[in-house]
Structure formats: structure tokens, C-alpha cells
Amino acid sequence: MSSTRNTVGLSVNQKKWIYIAISFAAMMIIKNVTFPSSITIINGAELTATGQEALSVLVLALLLWITEAIPFHFTGILAMALLSVFGVDSFANIVKVGFGNINVIFFIGVFILSAFINKSGLGKRLVNICLSITGNSTKFILLGFIVTGVILSMWISNMAVAAMLMPLAKSLLDEEGVEPLKSNFGKALMMSVAWGSLIGGFGTPAGNGPNPLAIGFMKDMAGVDVSFLDWMKYGVPISIILIPVAWGLLMLVFKPEMTHLKKSNEEIRKEFKNQPKLSRDEIVTLIIFIVTVLTWIFSAQLKKLLGIDLPIALPIAFTSMLFFFPGVSTIKYKEIEKSMSWSSIILVLSGVSLGMVLYDSGVANWIALGLLGRIENLSPILMVFVVVLSVSIMNITLSSATVSASIVIPIIIGLAMNIGVHTMALAFPAALASSLAFILITSTPTNVIAYSAGYFSIKDFAKVGVIMTVFSCIVVAVVMYGVGLMTGLY
């Protein structure tokens, strides 16, 4: 039997056509069915005809992304085109929202920096330093990447941390000859880059965009002041507990096919000790890398000093271009161009377009109120769990944690005030849940950076991500309730 056929005689292409047919059928059913008012109007939020059409396209995109029937980035473009064909918005506006996004520059800069880290040999050197600490055990290497990601992303943007760690993980996997999409170790290690970055975002207000957004909403809407330390009382324990959860889950679902690297610990120590001096290209890359990271870390201070806004894309827009100034590096652009993952850029930007259309059409608000409208009858710990789970579901439909937070947190603050619950008791876990982007690649650029290396599929990510999301919801709810009892929040 041909390798392209499965046990029931269907070829890979035939299966993909079936998935495509099912996806389009589901879209047309949702687009054309007449829902009763009990569904279209929930707690004052209405699913309009335009919103229903946008919802149908979302279902199509989710099914095609999960089944991998067509390349992921083309699914995003198809969704944008269908939104325009259905009259939800003009094609120009839909494209502008995503492809006019600042993340375009961020991703280009990240891929350039990552390529230079690998091409210069700096990545191999940094991996040797990492291995000198963890040894050659694959399970401890995996833990090392998760812990590093968590610690860094408490203070630096999730995207920035993933941008730092991805090339290091790729250098290690390249050196070991790990085959993309086939190696469990490759899948687990590259997912740990994304997961560690996401988990660390819980720890401090600086860790993730929705965190300061939630603090601002609580201050403006309810007059509740949340200090940096107040946040850490809840956020840091959650991050710490999720480290072994993430590590154990990745080891269980993607058990590495090798317990140790090819090198022995003695060889690792010897190689680390006998490394040659830094080459010119390594020194240049290291300086640019450090300048980029320091600019990210001290962006708030630089903003005050310079009097200009410093979004995450701006520093790397400058620093990544320095490589191409005459005489700066011996590595040519043609070599770097091969490492540019344009498909990943298209994927996340088309996802942003889809998410913003869902927001503008009212679908996001309808989903949020539908999920959260009856929580007042639940016990405090169940109330927190439902809030966290609901926001996690919202993350699937909206390709931006900040957009999810901006929709859900004001609704939750209003609910908390109406039912007599402390605002922080519900708004805080909602903000934390905005970082629970473990299911879809498109939920956050942090995932796209790890995915762009090519070692795991969207299906791989979703398979383990669903389990991680459930565990994370439980951990957030239990820690929030436990610490909340000690601090008088509940």
C-alpha cells in the first residue's frame, strides 16, 4: 500500500479534501441558520447578522488550522478574504488591521537576530554554557529552558523572551541533528520556549500586556489600587507551581526519544573548556543582542529619558538593521534571507485581522457575556475557575491577549461590583488567564516565534495545550482562592 494512504484506503490528499469540505459545510451552516433570540441575545449582548457571518468564518479557520488541511498561513488569508466576500468589512480594512500591525517589524527583527545568533556561532557557544549547567540529560535541559523562560518573562515581554530562547534551542537541536516535526525532544524543547515565556508572564505586572491593563481598569472603574507586590503575592506562586506542571506534561506527552544527548557530560565539560575565542561575528552579534535586551528591559526608563514611546518592535527595528551596515558583519543578507519565516508572519497577522473583526462585529462581546453571565450563583473558587476558563476560551477566538483582556476585564469588573465581590477577586484571575495561550499558535506572537523554528505542528501544540490549559485554570483558581483567603480577598 502506498505510504500516502491510511488503513481505510484514503490518501492524504483525499483526507484533506474531506476536512476542507467539513470546514466549509460548518461555516455555511452557521452563516445561514436562523438562531432563536435566546441564543442571539445573551445578557444584553446581541449576535448580529454581521457577527454571525464573522463567527462562521472563525469556525472555518479553527477547523482548517486544527486539521492542517491547507498551510496555516493560507488559512489565515482565506479567512480574511471570506470576511470581505461576506461583507463583514472591506478587504482593505481587514488587511490593514493585521498587516499594518507593529508586530510585522518585530517578527522581521526577531528572525534576523535569531539567524545571526545561529550563523555566527554564538548560539552554539551559549548552548554550551547552558549544557555545562544542565548536563546532557534531555529532561533537565527541558526544565532549564522552562525555568529560564519563566524567570526572564517576569521582567521582560513574553515575545522578547521567546525571541531570545528560540535560537538557542534551535542551535542545540541542529547540533544534535534532530529532525523537525519527527523528534519528540525537538517538539518538547521548542514548546518549552513558548510555555516558559507564557508562564513567567503571570508573575509580575511587567510580565504581560494584560497585567498593567487590568491594574488600570481596576483603578479607573472601581478605585482599587494594586501594587507591584500585591500582584506578585498571587502571580509568583502560580508561575512557580506551573513550572513542574509544564515540565511533567511535556515529558509525558512528548517523551524524548533520547534520555541524553549524544555528547557525554565529560565531552560537554571538555568542549565548554576548550571553546575558541569569540570570533568577530560573535562579538558583533553579542553586542547587538545585549543592546536589544537592555533596551527591552529598560524601556520604561528610556521612555522617560527620551520622551518617546518605545514599543517592543522599535528597539529591534534599529538593532537588527545594524548587522547590514558596511563592514559590521561578514555574514551576508542572502544567508539570512533563508531563515526568514514569512509564513509565520502571515499566520499571526492574519490571525490579528480575524480577531479584530470579531471584536468590531460584537462577536467577542457576545461570547464573553455568554460565558460569564451567570457566575454570581457559584462558590468563590468555582467563580474564579469559570472566569479563568472563559477567558482561556476567548483567547482561542482573539489573536491578542491584550484584546481579550480589554473586552473581558471591564465586563468582569462590572459583574463583581453588581454581585458584591471584591473587584480584584475576579479581575485579577481574568488578567492572568489572558496569558493562557497554550492551545492555538495564533493566540500570541510568543507561540509563533517558537513555531517558526519548524519543530512542532499546530496539532501537536493544541493536543498538549488543551491539557495544559485545564491544569493552568485549576492552578490559577486554587492559588487565587488560597492566597485570597489569607489576605482577606474572599
Image (cartoon, rainbow, N blue to C red):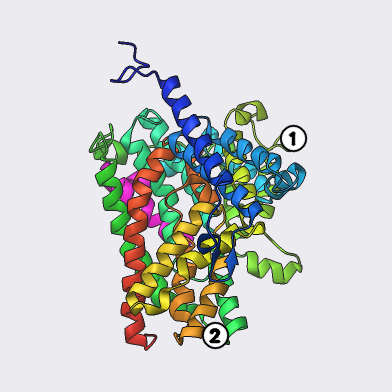
For disc 1, the marked residue is 326
The residue lying furthest to the left in this view is: 259
Pointer 2 with pointer 1, Cβ within 8 A:
no
Q: Quadrant of the N terminus?
A: top left
For disc 2, the marked residue is 225
- Which sits in the foreground, 332 or 424? 424
Question: Neighbour class for label 1 at 10 Å: few (<14), some, many (≥20)?
Answer: few
Q: Position of residue 60 (x, y in %)?
A: 53, 40
Asked whether the viewer can see residue 470, the reply is: yes
The segment highlighted magenta reads 130-153
Q: Residue 144 lies in magenta, yes or no?
A: yes
Q: Residue 360 sits in which quadrant? A: bottom right
Q: Residue 340 lies in magenta, yes or no?
A: no
Mark 2 and mark 1 lie on one chain; the one further toward the N terminus is: 2
Q: Position of residue 327 (x, y in %)?
A: 71, 34
Q: Residue 254 sits in which quadrant? A: top left
Q: Tag 1: residue type?
A: Pro
Q: How many marks?
A: 2
Is 422 placed left or right of 143 in the picture? right
Q: Tag 2: residue type?
A: Asp
Q: Secondary structure at mark 2?
A: loop
Asked whether the viewer can see residue 273, the reply is: no
